[in-house]
Amino acid sequence: MTKTEIRNLVEKDIREYRYVPPSGTFLGVPFSEHKMNAQLEDLRRHLREPLLVPFSDGASRWIVTQTDQNGYFVFFDEDSSDYGLGIVDYEGKPEDINVHGNLVGTYAAR
C-alpha cells in the first residue's frame, strides 16, 4: 500500500467509526460514549503522515499517530489489516506490544 492509501484508510476508519458499548460479562467498566468521543477527538489531533518503518521484529508497519506522552503510538499492519499499539524499545526501534483492533479502540487502549 502507498502512504496515500494508508492515509485514506485511516480517514475512512475514523469517519465510519461508531461506538457500540460492549455487552456481557467482563472485567472493569466499559468506556462511556462520552469518553470514547473524547478519545476519537484526541486521535484526530494526534494523526501523523503515515510512515513505513521497520519494527524490532524485522517487519515493516505504518505508524499513523504521533507518539503520546507515555511513549505509545498506533500503527497499521498491512499483513493482518489491523491496527496495533507500539512503543519504542530500548534500542530505539518501534515495537509491537500486541494490542490490536480497530483504529479508535486501539488508540483508546493506551
Image: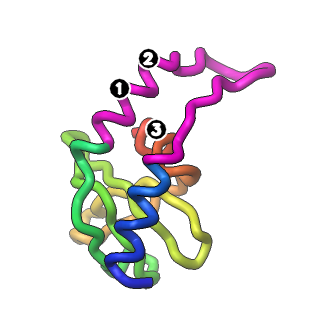
* SS assignment at label 3: loop
**In contact (CB < 8 Å): disc 2 and disc 1:** yes
Q: Is residue 8 above or below residue 40?
A: below
Q: Which of the marked residues, 3 or 2, is nearer the chain's N terminus?
A: 2
Question: Pointer 2: what residue?
Answer: 34
What residue span does the magenta drawing correspond to? 15-43
Residue type at the position of mark 3: Ala
Question: Pointer 1: what residue?
Answer: 38
Q: Whole-percent x and y of residue 38?
A: 35, 26
Q: Which of the marked residues, 3 or 1, is nearer the chain's N terminus?
A: 1
Question: Pointer 3: what residue?
Answer: 109
Seen at 44% across and 17% down, the residue is 34
* SS assignment at label 1: helix
Please state which of the two labelled residues, at mark 3 or mark 2, is closer to the viewer.
Answer: 2
Please state which of the two labelled residues, at mark 3 or mark 1, is closer to the viewer.
Answer: 1
Q: Whole-percent x and y of residue 88?
A: 28, 61
Residue type at the position of mark 1: Ala
Q: Is residue 21 above or below residue 108?
A: above
- Position of residue 2 in the picture relative to residue 29 (left or right): left
Pointer 3 local density, CA inside 10 Å: few below 14, some 14–19, many at least 20 = few
